[in-house]
């Protein structure tokens, strides 16, 4: 069958439909919350401060009194005392409501470094999963920012990690 305009048009339409379906599935709120959470944890493992900052919204506020600036500063302090962290998320649950998304999972940490044992004990022993709240920042389907982290079982004092 020799190539002609009609075959090229059909091939182009088929390719456009496949790409369109892929993007619609990729940009679903649940999928974006899942991907943003996984990428945030990967940046934390790499101890990449600028990569982490890119995920955190300007309106970040958590139950421990941290805003965006305080959170990033505290993370820099913790990173100085830990070696190569390995973060694992288990029993992941995701839900989305219009421009909000929630990622909930039990997080375990394996670390090396000066305070590795203390950090592992404090995080890995928590009976309640962590919840990350994401908000979509604009009409762009990929523009999600972290605005809150919560774990009711975790208390943070000013003197501890």
Image (tube, helix red, strand yellow):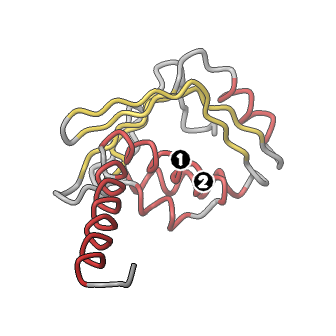
Q: Secondary structure at mark 2?
A: helix
- Labelled pair 1, 2 in contact (Cβ < 8 Å): yes
Q: Residue at x 54, y 17 (%)?
A: 128
Question: Image check: 101 left or right of 157?
Answer: left
Secondary structure under tag 1 reads helix
Q: Which mark is residue 38?
A: 1
Tell me the quarter of the picture where residue 18 sits.
bottom left
Is the residue 17 above or below the residue 117 in the image? below
Closer to us: 117 or 16: 16
Residue 42's disc number: 2
Find residue 125 and report its horizontal and vertical position in percent. Answer: 68, 20
Decide: is 20 above or below 136: below
Q: Is residue 20 above or below residue 147?
A: below
Instruction: Give the quarter of the image for residue 3.
Output: bottom left
Percent of width and height locating residue 7: 29, 75
Label 1 – label 2 distance at C-alpha? 6 Å
Q: Could you tell me which residue is drawn at 30 percent across and 43 percent down?
A: 29
Residue 98 is tagged as none
* Label 2 CA crowd tier, 10 Å (few <14, some 14–19, many 20+): some
Q: Nearer the viewer, residue 114 or 133?
A: 133
Residue 1 point in image, percent of width and height: 39, 78
Question: If the image is split into quadrants, where does the C terminus sit?
Answer: top right
Is 114 left, or right, of 121 in this rendering?
Answer: right
């Amino acid at each position: 069958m020799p190539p002609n305009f009609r075959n090229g048009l059909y091939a182009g339409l088929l390719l456009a439909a496949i790409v369109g379906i892929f993007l619609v599935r990729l940009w679903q709120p649940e999928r974006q919350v899942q991907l943003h959470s996984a990428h945030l944890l990967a940046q934390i493992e790499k101890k990449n401060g600028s990569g982490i900052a890119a995920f955190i919204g300007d309106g970040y506020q958590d139950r421990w009194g941290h805003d965006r600036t305080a959170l990033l500063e505290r993370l820099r302090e913790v990173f100085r005392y830990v070696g190569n962290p390995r973060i694992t998320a288990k029993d992941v649950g995701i839900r989305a409501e219009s421009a909000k998304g929630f990622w909930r999972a039990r997080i375990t940490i394996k670390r090396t470094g000066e305070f590795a044992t203390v950090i592992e004990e404090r995080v890995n022993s928590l009976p309640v999963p962590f919840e990350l709240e994401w908000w979509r920042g604009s009409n762009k389907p990929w523009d999600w920012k972290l605005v809150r982290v919560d774990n009711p079982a975790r208390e943070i004092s000013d003197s501890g990690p």
